[in-house]
Image: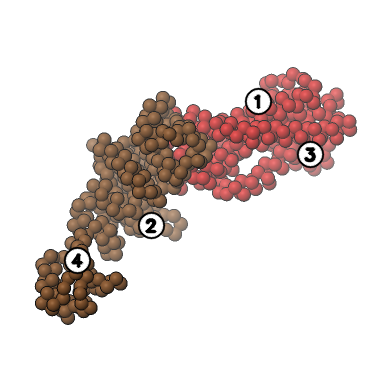
């Protein structure tokens, strides 16, 4: 009798109906990054011994795409519903704040994973196949999508206009994902920026995810898992508290 | 039996505006109840509190005996709301919209009822159309259908006929009256007072967040006993005794408000005595608009 399956289904259907925009486009963008960076740097850079630059780059690109799309799914769905006024359709039924949270989060995770799989699939042409460590891969992929999906819910609820959401995306999400070791190892940075990078939770997500593919990383993957887990708990607690209060949804 | 809707001492303030200032109402099951008031009187705030879209600062509200905050699941299951704004989700077609809305209420196999509502609201030919491509009237019908997918015993309509053409208004009211005859409780807000007069058995009037009148429509209509007569005369002046009582309208006719028909008889006798002929006369009985205007002026 729960309304959760319907809201989850609706959120899935919403992104699937515009699959070219929500899945194909980010896969193409990641492919372009791969073509340009691997072409320019493949011969010149070896980040880890015995690992080609392209092999190093692919996990970073997969993770970056998952992060950005998980965030985009929940945040864009909520801001559109609020701007168009159809958010009332989910506020009038007897849905609890927990069902609301899980449905938006679940769809964000699925979209992140689908885009991640798509990026990985197209990059197989460019990087030699290596069987990743599935346990680490799944743990990091799920946690990363869930964290950014929850951040997307907070942003979607908080933003009152599209430009506020765009600011959130451009000045917070984009720098955090780009400056987190997608294209480089933080060991190549000056000591100050290495220290700063350790305060960026996205760095741990990319570093740990890459470990699942190449077996080498900048920090201990267990530490990364701990940081990611703590981040997920914290952002979920914040999101649930906001939803329970009806922050900017129920006046 | 619990009232269909019960609100007690509801108060709500938005920054500098006291939207509701101690509203109490009981609406019984099966009633067709009208909520009238000028813009900003608090009608939509009251409905939003009943629907759980807004939280009251103090007081209580319940649908079919279920508190809208504490027992929100039961109260929302018992309530269907047709919002004032013409909103829709452009990602889905009509049937998908109704199936999804059913799902939010935990109803899985609801296609039989969905087909029935679509049929009654003439939405069946548009079932597979994207909601974005529907006309304004069809979007309004879809909102009504969405409010009914879970067969709620209480239905709230917030200005459902604003900007709607005559045909749709008529068919909408036939449909809603049918639901009322089947036992559904209807709470209606509207700016069309003739609609409220024709449909509602009882009416409450709100002004500045307070209930300033609440009675049966029949009793409210008796609050004012002023009749109005409009006369066209073959003279430019009227007997001196009636100057001031008779008002001249822009089209040259004369108007008089009176409470006893005997007054009209005296006027006609005096006109005859002064050799003034009545060319045309129209009588108008007081309607809800007169009562509404009167109450809003007095309170």
Residue linked to disc 1: A139
- Against A205, residue B249 (above or below) is below
Residue linked to disc 2: B39
Along the viewing direction, whichever of B138 and B293 lies nearer the viewer? B138
Badge 3: few (under 14), some or many (20 or more) residues near its Cα, within 10 Å? Answer: some
CB-based contact (under 8 Å), mark 4 and mark 3: no
Q: Chain of mark 2?
A: B
Along the viewing direction, whichever of A197 and B19 lies nearer the viewer? B19
User: What's the residue at 35%, 58% (across, down)?
Assistant: B38
Q: Chain of mark 4?
A: B
Sequence order check, earlier mark of 2 and 4: 2
User: What's the residue at 59%, 40% (across, down)?
Assistant: A75
Q: Provide the secondary structure element on which disc 2 rests.
A: loop
Whether residue A92 sits left or right of residue B37 in the image: it is right
Residue linked to disc 3: A194
Q: Is residue A208 in sight in this rendering?
A: no
* Residue B161 x %, y %: 37, 48
Considering every residue shown, the one lying at the far bottom of the view is: B240
Q: Chain B shown in which color?
A: brown
Q: Chain of mark 1?
A: A
Residue linked to disc 4: B281
Q: Provide the secondary structure element on which disc 1 rests.
A: helix
For the residues marked 2 and 3, what is the alpha-carbon distance in whole angstroms?
A: 60 Å
Q: Quadrant of the N terminus of chain A?
A: top left
Q: Provide the secondary structure element on which disc 3 rests.
A: helix
Whether residue B142 sits left or right of residue B30 in the image: it is right
Badge 4: few (under 14), some or many (20 or more) residues near its Cα, within 10 Å? Answer: few
Q: Provide the secondary structure element on which disc 4 rests.
A: strand
């Amino acid at each position: 009798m729960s309304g959760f399956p319907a809201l989850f289904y609706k959120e899935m259907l919403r992104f699937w109906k515009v699959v070219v925009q929500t899945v194909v486009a980010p896969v193409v963008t990641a492919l372009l990054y791969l073509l340009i960076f691997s072409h320019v740097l493949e011969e010149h850079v070896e980040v880890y011994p015995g690992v080609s630059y392209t092999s190093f780059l692919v996990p970073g690109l997969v993770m970056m795409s998952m992060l950005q799309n998980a965030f985009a799914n929940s945040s864009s769905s909520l801001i559109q519903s609020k701007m168009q006024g159809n958010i009332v359709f989910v506020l009038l039924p007897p849905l609890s704040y927990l069902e609301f949270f899980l449905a938006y989060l679940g769809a964000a995770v699925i979209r992140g994973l689908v885009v991640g799989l798509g990026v990985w699939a197209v990059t197989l042409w460019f990087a030699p196949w290596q069987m990743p460590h599935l346990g680490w891969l799944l743990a990091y992929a799920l946690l990363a999508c869930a964290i950014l999906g929850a951040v997307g819910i907070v942003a979607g609820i908080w933003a009152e206009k599209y430009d506020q959401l765009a600011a959130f995306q451009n000045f917070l999400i984009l720098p955090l994902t780009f400056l987190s070791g997608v294209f480089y190892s933080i060991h190549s940075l000056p000591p100050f920026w290495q220290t700063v990078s350790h305060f960026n939770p996205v760095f741990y997500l990319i570093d740990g995810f890459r470990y699942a593919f190449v077996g080498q990383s900048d920090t201990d993957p267990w530490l990364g898992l701990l940081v990611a887990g703590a981040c997920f708990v914290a952002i979920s607690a914040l999101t649930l508290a906001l939803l329970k209060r009806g922050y900017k949804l129920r006046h | 039996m619990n009232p269909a809707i019960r609100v007690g001492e509801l108060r709500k303030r938005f920054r500098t505006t006291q939207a509701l200032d101690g509203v109490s109402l009981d609406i019984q099951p099966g009633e067709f109840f009208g909520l009238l008031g000028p813009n900003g009187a608090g009608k939509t705030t009251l409905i939003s509190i009943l629907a759980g879209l807004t939280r009251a600062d103090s007081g209580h509200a319940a649908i079919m005996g279920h508190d809208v905050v504490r027992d929100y699941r039961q109260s929302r299951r018992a309530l269907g709301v047709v919002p004032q704004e013409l909103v829709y989700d452009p990602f889905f077609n009509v049937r998908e919209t109704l199936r999804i809305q059913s799902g939010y209420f935990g109803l899985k196999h609801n296609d039989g009822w969905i087909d029935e509502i679509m049929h009654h609201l003439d939405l069946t030919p548009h079932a597979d159309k994207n909601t974005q491509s529907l006309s304004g009237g069809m979007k309004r019908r879809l909102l009504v259908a969405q409010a009914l997918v879970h067969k709620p015993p209480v239905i709230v309509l917030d200005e459902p006929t604003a900007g709607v053409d005559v045909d749709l208004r008529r068919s909408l009211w036939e449909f809603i009256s049918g639901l009322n005859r089947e036992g559904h409780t209807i709470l209606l807000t509207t700016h069309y007072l003739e609609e409220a007069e024709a449909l509602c058995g009882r009416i409450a009037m709100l002004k500045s967040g307070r209930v300033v009148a609440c009675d049966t429509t029949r009793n409210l209509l008796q609050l004012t006993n002023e009749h109005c007569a409009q006369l066209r005369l073959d003279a430019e002046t009227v007997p001196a005794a009636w100057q001031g009582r008779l008002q001249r309208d822009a089209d040259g006719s004369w108007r008089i408000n009176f409470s006893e028909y005997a007054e009209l008889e005296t006027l006609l006798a005096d006109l005859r005595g002064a050799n003034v002929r009545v060319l045309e006369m129209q009588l108008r009985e007081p309607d809800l608009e007169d009562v509404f205007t009167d109450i809003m002026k007095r309170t």
